[in-house]
């Protein structure tokens, strides 16, 4: 049995070592660190890993396949392209000349039209040339993101688990492929509650002496997957927040953003049930009873 910390390249070496007939156990570095004695060196790290992997309560990381890592590579590249903030840069530069547009990515066309209009004297010629290059890069980035979205959508159509996940309101092809590639075998989690906690969608605890103190979510696990679930929950809340009795009751008791995170937690639990049991999402029956506060 071989123990490794789940770090860069660890999944590749886990597959290579497994091909030699060994059993590989991957552990999160934060779970190994408490077993390091004083000074950090290779010998102390190896001793800590050996000690950690023998603990009965230790949680291990499932070894990802090459297909899973390939799908995650698409997601990481897409995330990098989206995070370039080219729209914000264009807004900031044009604001220096008193040119602004309403918020939202759909309103950027108003700014690009100003730059393309040679008769608009508000933009100096020198600035117009460099801003046009920024717009060209923005359009190229948008095209690349659309290509990646199309790849993920096509992959979701051919994957049985993704097809089941996309039946859940708030989960589309992007979130479905991210879930299947990141989680893999959902049965490694005892319940949907464990999956939601692994994603950091559970309250932070600071309890002592039998008194329970709960705070905001502790944001552990995969931040990218957590953001996708929160965005999906926000979309569901926007379109079905008043028609769903459960959501309507939740909004009466809690602020909007708190309700969104609670719904994201519920989406994670539903996703676990769909993946672990191999069943399609069953929409709950709608009753005419009013939502309770």
Image: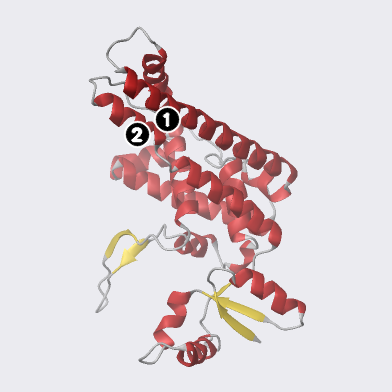
Q: Is residue 153 visible?
A: yes
Q: Nearer the viewer, residue 76 or 278?
A: 76
How many neighbours does mark 2 have within 10 angstroms: few (below 14), some (14-19), or many (20 or more)?
A: few
Q: Quadrant of the N terminus?
A: bottom right
Q: Are marks 2 and 1 in contact (CB under 8 Å)?
A: yes
Q: Measuring from the top left, give residue 270's x and y in whole percent.
A: 55, 51
Above or below for 150 versus 183 = above
Residue that appears at 69% across and 63% down:
65
Secondary element under disc 1, as helix, strand or loop, is helix
Residue that appears at 29% across and 18% down:
124
Secondary element under disc 2, as helix, strand or loop, is helix
Farthest residue to the top: give it. Answer: 119
Above or below for 278 versus 231 = below
In the image: residue 94, left or right of residue 49:
left
Q: Is residue 62 visible?
A: no
Q: Measuring from the top left, give residue 246's x and y in whole percent.
A: 42, 42
Mark 2 to mark 1 CA distance (whole Å): 9 Å
- In which quarter of the view is residue 38 placed? bottom left
Q: Which residue is mark 1?
A: 134
Q: Which residue is mark 2?
A: 89
Above or below for 21 versus 177 = below
How many neighbours does mark 1 have within 10 angstroms: few (below 14), some (14-19), or many (20 or more)?
A: some
Q: Measuring from the top left, give residue 3's x and y in whole percent.
A: 59, 83
Q: Nearer the viewer, residue 289 or 14?
A: 14
Above or below for 50 versus 85 = below
- In which quarter of the view is residue 217 placed? bottom left
Q: Measuring from the top left, give residue 138's x and y in whole percent.
A: 47, 31
Q: Quadrant of the C terminus?
A: top left
Residue that appears at 60% across and 47% down:
176
């Amino acid at each position: 049995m071989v123990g490794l910390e789940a770090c860069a390249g660890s999944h590749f070496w886990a597959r290579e070592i497994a091909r030699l007939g060994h059993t590989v156990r991957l552990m999160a570095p934060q779970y190994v660190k408490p077993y390091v004695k004083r000074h950090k060196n290779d010998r102390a790290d190896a001793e800590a890993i050996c000690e950690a992997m023998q603990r009965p309560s230790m949680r291990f990381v499932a070894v990802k396949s090459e297909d899973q890592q390939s799908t995650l590579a698409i997601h990481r590249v897409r995330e990098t392209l989206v995070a370039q903030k080219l729209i914000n840069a264009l807004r900031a530069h044009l604001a220096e000349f008193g040119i602004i547009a309403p918020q939202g990515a759909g309103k950027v066309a108003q700014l690009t039209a100003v730059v393309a209009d040679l008769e608009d004297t508000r933009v100096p010629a020198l600035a117009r040339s460099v801003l046009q290059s920024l717009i060209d890069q923005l359009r190229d980035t948008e095209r690349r993101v659309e290509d990646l979205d199309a790849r993920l959508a096509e992959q979701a159509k051919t994957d049985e688990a993704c097809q089941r996940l996309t039946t859940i309101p708030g989960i589309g092809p992007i979130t479905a492929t991210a879930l299947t590639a990141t989680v893999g075998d959902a049965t490694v989690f005892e319940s949907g509650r464990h999956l939601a906690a692994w994603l950091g969608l559970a309250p932070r605890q600071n309890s002592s002496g039998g008194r329970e103190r709960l705070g905001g979510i502790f944001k552990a696990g995969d931040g990218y997957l957590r953001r996708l679930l929160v965005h999906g929950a926000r979309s569901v809340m926007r379109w079905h927040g008043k028609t769903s009795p459960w959501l309507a009751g939740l909004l009466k008791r809690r602020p909007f953003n708190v309700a969104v995170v609670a719904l994201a937690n519920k989406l994670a639990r539903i996703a676990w049930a769909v993946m672990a049991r191999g069943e399609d999402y069953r929409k709950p029956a709608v009753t005419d009873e009013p939502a309770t506060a």
